Image (spheres, grey):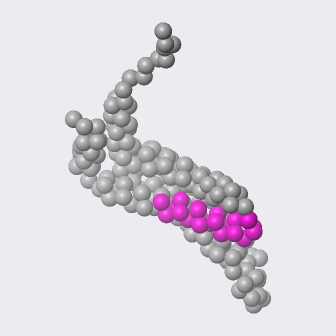
Amino acid sequence: MDVKKEMNQIIETAYADTPGLEGFQKRKKVLLWALVLLALAQKAVLIFLMGATSWLGILIGLTVGMGVAAIFALAAYRGPWKVGFVFYLLGLIPAVDVAKAAGPLFMMIAENAPLASYGGVLLLFSLETAYAVLALGLALWMTIPPRSRQLGEAAHEMGKACNKLMKEAQPPKTPLTPKQ
């Protein structure tokens, strides 16, 4: 049997054996992508506000800025439900930043400062708030409800079965031997 067909069979069996798993995986994928894209948007606005002009610097800044969220998103998608606890940290750090920045930002708004003087900061504030809310909401959704934990564990088992199949399908490694 073809490896792709076997993997699809493993996934279909897991979906059939665990009602709600397919929807859980789809929702989790959408939320994790939203988190990564919010991180990317947040870093892009921050780099723009800092006045970066080097394309290499911009590219490195975006990659590093998005990298943390992307690594944890991948771990949460493929890993056990316990990885969701990391999202508490990913949500609390920007939440503290938002709380610190709220006072000065609202003072500028209250003093009727022109929007051009704080518009970019307001956009960054909004993106960081959305990121913090989404990360904390994702953490709560993945770790608190027992059904989410059960579905997360079933998804992890499905992923382990697919990984095992992929490892078995690879040809055995041969040691390098010198030519004679």
Depicted 9 relative to depicted 46: above or below? above
User: In terms of secondary structure, what is the magenta stretch mainly?
Assistant: helix
- Closer to the camera, 143 or 4? 4
Q: Is residue 171 left or right of residue 49?
A: left
The structure residue drawn at horizontal position 56% and vertical position 65%, both measured from the top left corner, is 38
Q: For the point 72% across and 84% down, which residue is it?
A: 116
Number of dots carrying numbers: 0
Spot occupied by residue 146 in the image (x, y as percentages of width and height): 39, 52
Q: Is residue 78 visible?
A: yes
Verify whether residue 64 appears in magenta. Answer: no
Above or below, comparing residue 96 to residue 75 in the picture: below
Residue 2 x, y percent position in the rendering: 25, 37
Q: Is residue 93 visible?
A: no
Residue at left 39%, top 60%?
Answer: 27
Camera-nearest residue between 57 and 39: 57
Q: Quadrant of residue 97?
A: bottom right
Is 5 placed left or right of 35 in the picture? left
Residue reaching furthest to the top: 180
Q: Is residue 117 above or below residue 102?
A: below
Q: Residue at x 49, y 17 (%)?
A: 176
Q: As drawn, which residue projects farthest toward the front?
A: 180
Q: Is residue 51 magenta?
A: yes
Which quarter of the figure is the N terminus placed in? top left
Give residue 63's position: percent from left, percent from top.
Answer: 62, 54
For the record, the magenta segment spans 33-53
